[in-house]
Image (spheres, rainbow, N blue to C red):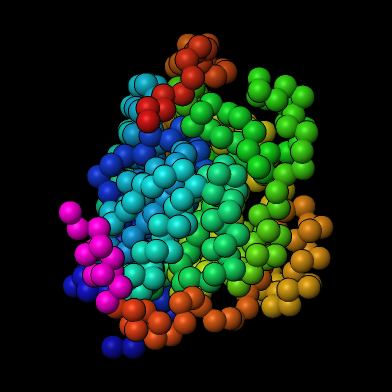
Amino acid sequence: MTDAIRLKAKDYKSEVKPIWCPGCGHFSVHNAITKAMAALGIDKDRTVLVSGIGCSSRLPAYVDSYGFHGVHGRGLAIAQGLKVARPDLTVLALGGDGDGFSIGGNHFIHACRRNVDITYIAMDNEVYGMTKGQASPTTPMDWDHSKLTPHGPGVRPFKPAALALASGAPWIARGYSGNPNQIAKLIAEAVEFPGFSFLHVMSQCITFCPEQTDWKAIVTESEAPPLADADEAAKQFLHEDGFQTGLLYREQRATWPPPGATAAEEGAPGELAAAFRV
Amino acid sequence: MATTATDSALANFLAHSLELESEARERYGELAESMDAHHNRPVADFFRRMAAEAEHHLQEVAALAGHMTLPQLKAWEFDWPDAEPPETASYEALHYRMSLRQAMQLALANEHAAERYYREFANRTGDAGTAAVANRFADEERGHAAELERMIAALPASGLHLREEDDEPHMPE
């Protein structure tokens, strides 16, 4: 880090105050990110938070670093492009379950297989909160709280960890907003992992899914080391209840772009800019 | 100068106390701001007062720590009985329409949790000096709890449930 004095978590918070509902799980992730940044001594001027659209995607505004509040579902595309162009930066992509697994679902699976060295934090509250509570790809099939789906969405919810594994993600973890310190630890590990790290956070929506306050009694913290065998992880991710937290899977594989590729293509951005010059 | 067992035990205890009070201050401050954003002014004011109380206690602990070298622990390296420090308001207990009574009851539970934590620390540490400080902190937390109980008793009988409000949460894009 370049700062002469070691910064505390609150030093990484911006002057912009969150307007999430009191009790929203995203506060916990916000706190966890700043705690992880403080613990790692991350230089705020060399860190970029990129998001899509939704309640959780407001988060970059609340952190005192560079940020980009992007287009719905496209946070991962922007984050990967940024990291490839500027590999010296620490890049975190953020978003919710609707942003990441519905409109951004295609970007998610290809980010997993491409393995650019970024961290993706998906804050999953199983609902579209900003638009007042509609079913998302992770909503339970019998959730009947929305007027749009009065009998529940009727389709099985995505299993984000299984989807990430099948798509090739080399680092998969799960956190719970009731335990921000565990999330902070996972974020620190994710940032230090050389490759695409996917952190799925069960982040409660107090307002539209008050039943999620029950999660606290259900979640368990895994004491086991992360799985390294994809077959074994697939069995676990397909059959688990989804409430086990911790680092669940980790393997090492080559990141993209391959070493040297960026340097060899250094002239490309300049040529591209020239092509678009009016 | 060699570090004694007393120094080490006390330093560990004070590091935890500072984190406990700091987290309580941060959380109450955060809650005050978010309640302000959702126009729940009485609860916002109350949480702001609790943040000030935590800040006051934090300064007391900091003064006690003085020039001691405290262990530098990461957020996840502290040893708490639960996921978060005892005096930190749990997100699950919150709602933008919560009443002042509910907010006070939440704060009361936090004060009791802090008292319990300090008392248990005093009981399990083998160091008499550290136990004395921990018991003193526990007594202070009990005093805060008693004050809150008086405030709750003085409230009108209403406010047992979420405030009635037709509006959806305030979420400007």
Query: How far from the left and from the top, in percent, is residue B138?
Result: 46, 50
The correct choice, above or below, for A168 with respect to A160 in the image is below
Residue A55 or A25: which is nearer the viewer?
A: A55
Q: Quadrant of the C terminus of chain B?
A: top left
Residue B40 image-quadrant placement:
top left
Residue drawn at 46 percent across, 77 percent down? A257
Residue at 60% over, 44% down: A102
* Front one among A197 and A204: A197
- Relative to residue B162, is residue B28 depicted above or below? below
Q: Residue at x 66, y 42 (%)?
A: A137
Nearest to the observer: residue B125 or residue B15: B15
Quarter occupied by the N terminus of chain B: bottom left
Q: Is residue A91 left or right of residue A128?
A: left
Residue B10 within the segment the image draws in magenta = no
**Range drawn in magenta:** A267-278
User: Which residue is nearer to you in this view: A278 or A110?
Assistant: A278
In this rendering, does residue A128 appear at all?
yes
- Residue A160 percent coordinates (x, y): 66, 54
Q: Quadrant of residue A229?
A: bottom right
> Residue A236's x, y, as percent?
78, 64
Is residue A274 one of those drawn in magenta? Answer: yes
Residue B49: percent from left, percent from top: 32, 33
Magenta: predominant secondary structure element? helix
Residue at the location (49% across, 76% down)?
A256
Q: Is residue A182 above or below residue A1?
A: above
